[in-house]
């Protein structure tokens, strides 16, 4: 079986997704074979360069034409967030299966429309929170399913980066609210919110603070000119997941933290912690061991008994960032072929939009805010 | 020069303080010689046993008699928090120098009275936030003074312990609000708040949540009987220190975290992090190094060039928990002898009471609360 | 420019090399484009399956036919060591550039013949000690070139694995000396010897011990039958590199060590350490820093300023095992195109054979043995 | 019960032992009370200063007079190694219990005479390999006794320090062979050899290399003058303990290694590792856990269930270097009172002399050497 892919966009995420489409069939031999059929971008020249470099067979310059093509089975959206809803809804309505980069949308309302469209069209849909498919995080999820943590008391997470510490780093469009919508929150905060949902469940209510520490930056290519930064460069928020406390921090201003997405969960049977800078490791504290032997057990998640690993290399041969996307594409291709459920789907992605929405409201109001329901009770997932 | 010590209390902190008084003169040979003159407790029998074990010359059973003794120069208070104010004020009024265990008081109002009394009496006063004198933390303070972090963007701290995870752990008096005042907040939260004040400055405003996850526990010695837990067993709070964001979590319910007091500071010149379970180490990220060489520099704080170390052992011979108290006692004896300033004094301690007070108000109100001033502007410290 | 690759062999290393050939042009856009022209194996059926899975255009079942093909520019040898010499020499004589898996040969004499053949044919040649191209190790090499370690006193290295700890693990052909030649020594020891050569120079003399701890194992597919293990499963050796001491241990019997290739270098200006289980990190101790700030600096080698990284992902997005091969293929393709030198070439590879040869002699004799010269003085490299 | 201590020597080890004698009764309340009766040194002035600083009641300037005193029960020897035998034998013959700093003697022959003297006199005797009483090492020993490692394949150990890296560090008497006997080997090597004996058993045979990397150093107080260094500053050795391989390295030239005494043991049921720079931690890999959960379990050895800890502080309150001596003195006082066995006794200490003797022979001969028996077979321990 072969499935034809059409991708909209070609920047950083385009590189990561293209790599995943190319790699998946070599490491997951049984899956439907993806064919990198067409890549779409506004600039023909740049898109053709990308097609060559990334391995796509043809080029489109209008995403509507891409979606209209009969020979496309799956539409993969790697554009900025403000175009996700329009493209994804059109693709679903055209009967295409859809993968969408995160965050699903720039607003909860858009996200809800995307969920509805995908559901009506009965197409497979996935929002690319790729970190769910880090083998160590997949193992964490599995261990939680085995009740190894027991009742959860606390969840704490950070996503810390440093690339905006330098005040001379230019004011890109990403720092302009009218274009980008949100800052660290939409980028780092979305990952943090999705993992929290995935591992310990839905945030019920929260209180938040956001800040823009460096309020103006030089405009690139315009010597001597600066412009205001109108998005947050960091956010701190805390809330409740059922009875458990949950605390979060995301920032682009943490010197020394390169890509530090970390979480720790404390339950009454044990604890667990992870950080993305050492993504092949999961630490687990098991309170059911004899007292004198209890410790933080550093599991190197590179064994054939661990999720996804049997497809890759022998024990101890570590994986990196890009493998998360390959794992995701393989799962998606399988889901299309078999009709199996796949997560995080658009409804899961909308949950993160609901959380981000409450964070923004709270940062404005200074109050605790309730995270809105994505859909009417009983609609099920 | 010899200084006579009288100590009120003899439990865990009594053991730690007694050890420090005994040890200080052997490792800091130039300081005034402390003499462990008298220890005071309500039960004569238990106090006599403690005097013998801990090395005190005589016993009192009424702290007022201890304070009245002419041969006592320094009163060291290691009782529960509800008696601090009364004893400390009386001691100061009797002209004794005073050391008081933390938190300084059970309320901001008490703390303010203690500050005033010590000031009027012109006696040396110290609140025992011993962790300021972990050599690695003293080094951190020194490096901040050298502007190695630059402008601070973020402070984050945790104090995580696990001793209440077991729901069968008995309901001690510490878990009864009428006796103990507060729970994890007053114990762990006080340390966290003091270090934050010490390293990066005063919290201006904050929002907080506290919780009691295990609401009833068995009463010790009363099989089958339980009683409610009326203090918090965890707290999460966040606030602003000037422009910087600050986030905190304290709990007694984090399986695997034995005594995990940790902080991280992110500035525009560098970052720093520490945790008490590895108290001989300080990690420092220096953004002023060449890009390809920047990393987290794990400094083993056991060199003669580091604070306090020259008094102890050769490089690489690690110190432990108790040394923080010895360092503090040595500094206090010197301050008494020379008249030099010493910190954290009662005014510093009252700042932590002001922060705890705002946390409790916020946990009730669900609102951001302002941290009250300890004293009128211009009163100086 | 396009270069056609023919690969001999298709097992674990075949998978790793194929992946590298496929990936290189997407991440190193300026290099000559490799074309996966032909793969060669004895079983047509298995080779055809591999060709499909690994992405090769055609299949051969006789390596002589592969070498005879006009449309092959580069021969990539991933067969067991006993066939390296014959294939590589024939390929060089046919004017093909040659890549050969490590160890270069099963004996020093074979290795010397390979060096001579490649030199006569003036073809580019590379022995696949892929770990030289771990970015952290490439950074280490660069820093040593900048004299950051100064005069070296000590080198110590280990390569520890655990896959033979279980005595019921079957006796594969790899444990039969008549087929495999050597055990842990030829596999793990070769990597250790090459890195030592690369980073600190040539071992002059050494003394060694090897052992076979589990002397018999079950024969696979023959219930109840066992056979002797006739190769070493571990080796310890020590020697001198100039004045410096050097110590090494390799084993397949270290429970908990998955793929622990580690080294530490101590010099009079600083030290350095690395381990492959955390391959994105390099630790560096700089004695030229102020005393109070000296520490082990953990450099996360994922910055654009580090070797190879600009071709991959943004800072902090970690790489894995397979990237070492991609980096190597990119370098080799460039070397073929430009005529530039590339290392480790066959002469470098022969040095490792010389070291392994001395280790085996010493393990027999119980004496210190001199590492033989690979070639006559003045033949240069 | 009270036991009177007389100590010979007052330098670094004198400080550590004095501290231990002072501290033991406060933390081990049930033991016989040690009384710091007399300290002995050649210089009356310096010894009187030490007595005051370290807490001794009286002073002697001739160790023979100290031994002759009726009021001394225990003689504690902290002088350089060349005087151990004479003092210890005289003390034993005078019926005193004896503690002797390590290494037990400067030669195996001396060590044998000390063993014989102690045995004849039937006095308690202890050689101060204090690291056996690091709680984490005591736990390791206990776990080995529970067969948690199974059959041991490998032992590897290092003791790495850095204090001689600077070539301008002066040539002290410790670097003069006629006075000091040996260098890094006798100091660091002795600890390494004792722990190896303690944890995995007796070295049968070995091969060794020693080196003096910095051959001359400035003479202290004699500007412009240098003198040769006539002891080793590093040693590498390897051997067999039964079937297991064992490898060791000790040096004073490892930049960044402050006091890095480390070992790792690999067995067929699990592995274990430790390093003294993090002395509150023991790492344990348990092969009997389910495959997907196996990892390096970092046990924080500060729990009341761990050796010695119940005498110190609550869980998570870390200990340091000096506590090892306190634990040792408490055990020795108990052994004197109860008659119980205590180790490492002189016979154990002589084993280390036997190992050092073989190392020195091998470093001379370049051959494997057998470790001599300390005493006739059947003499038992």
Image (cartoon, coloured by chain):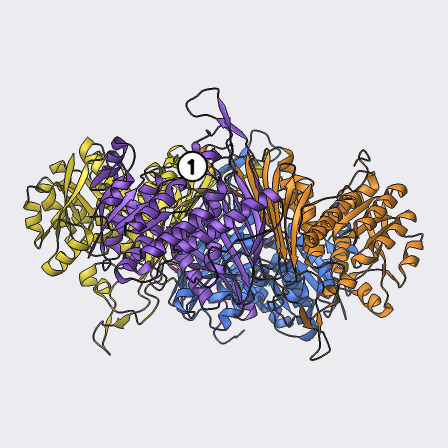
Chain colours: A orange, B purple, C blue, D yellow
Which quadrant, please, contains the C terminus of chain B?
A: bottom left
Residue at the image position 68 percent from the left and 53 percent from the top: A363
Residue D5 percent location from the top left of the image: 15, 44
Q: Kindly identify the residue that appears in the image at 30 percent across and 54 percent down.
A: D188
Examine the image and state in which quarter residue D198 appears: top left
Q: Is residue C90 left or right of residue D367?
A: right
Q: Is C375 colored magenta in this rendering?
A: yes
Confirm whether the magenta stretch covers residue D286: no
Res C208 visible: no
What is the x, y in percent for residue C169? 55, 37
Q: Is residue B229 above or below residue A363?
A: above
Residue D160: percent from left, percent from top = 36, 57
Q: Is residue C242 above or below residue A244?
A: below
- Vertical placement of C96 versus B196: above or below? below
Comparing B221 with A353, the one in front is B221
Residue beneath the point at 12% across and 40% down: D73
Q: Secondary structure at mark 1?
A: loop
Q: Nearer the viewer, residue A355 or C376?
A: A355
Stretch in magenta: C369-379
Q: Quadrant of the N terminus of chain B?
A: bottom left
Q: Is residue A163 visible?
A: yes
| Residue placed under numbered mark 1 in the picture | D151
Q: Is residue A157 left or right of residue C200?
A: right
Most common SS among magenta residues? loop
Compared to residue A360, the image places residue A62 above or below, namely below
């Amino acid at each position: 079986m072969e499935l034809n892919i059409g991708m909209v966009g070609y920047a950083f995420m385009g590189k990561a997704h293209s790599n995943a489409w190319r790699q998946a069939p070599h490491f997951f031999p049984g899956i439907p074979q993806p064919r990198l059929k067409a890549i779409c971008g506004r600039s023909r020249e740049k898109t053709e360069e990308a097609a060559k470099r990334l391995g796509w067979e043809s080029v489109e310059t209008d995403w509507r034409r891409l979606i209209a093509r009969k020979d496309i089975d799956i539409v993969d959206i790697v554009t900025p967030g403000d175009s996700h809803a329009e493209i994804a809804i059109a693709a679903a309505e055209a009967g295409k299966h859809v993968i969408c980069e995160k965050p699903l949308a720039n607003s909860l309302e858009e996200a809800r429309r995307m969920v509805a469209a995908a559901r009506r069209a009965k197409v497979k849909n996935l929002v690319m929170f790729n970190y769910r498919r880090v083998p160590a995080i997949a193992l964490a999820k599995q261990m939680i399913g085995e009740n190894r943590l027991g009742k959860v008391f606390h969840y704490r997470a950070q996503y810390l980066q440093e690339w905006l510490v330098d005040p001379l780093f230019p004011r890109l469009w990403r720092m302009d609210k009218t274009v980008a919508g949100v800052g660290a929150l939409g980028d780092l905060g979305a990952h943090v919110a999705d993992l929290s949902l995935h591992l310990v469940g839905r945030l019920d209510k929260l209180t938040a603070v956001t800040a823009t520490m460096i309020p103006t930056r030089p405009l690139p290519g315009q010597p001597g000119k600066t412009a205001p930064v109108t998005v947050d460069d960091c956010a701190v928020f805390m809330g409740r997941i059922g009875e458990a406390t949950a605390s979060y921090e995301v920032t682009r201003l943490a010197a020394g933290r390169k890509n530090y997405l970390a979480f720790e969960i404390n339950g009454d049977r044990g604890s667990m912690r992870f950080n993305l800078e050492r993504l092949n490791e999961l630490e687990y504290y098991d309170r059911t061991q004899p007292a004198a032997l209890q410790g933080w057990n550093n599991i190197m998640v590179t064994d054939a008994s661990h999720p996804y690993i049997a497809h890759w290399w022998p024990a101890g041969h570590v994986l990196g960032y890009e493998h998360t996307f390959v794992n995701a594409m393989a799962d998606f291709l399988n889901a299309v072929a078999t009709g199996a459920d796949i997560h995080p789907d658009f409804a899961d992605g909308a949950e993160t939009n609901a959380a981000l929405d409450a964070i923004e409201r709270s940062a404005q109001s200074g109050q605790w805010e309730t995270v809105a329901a994505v859909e009417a009770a009983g609609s099920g997932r």
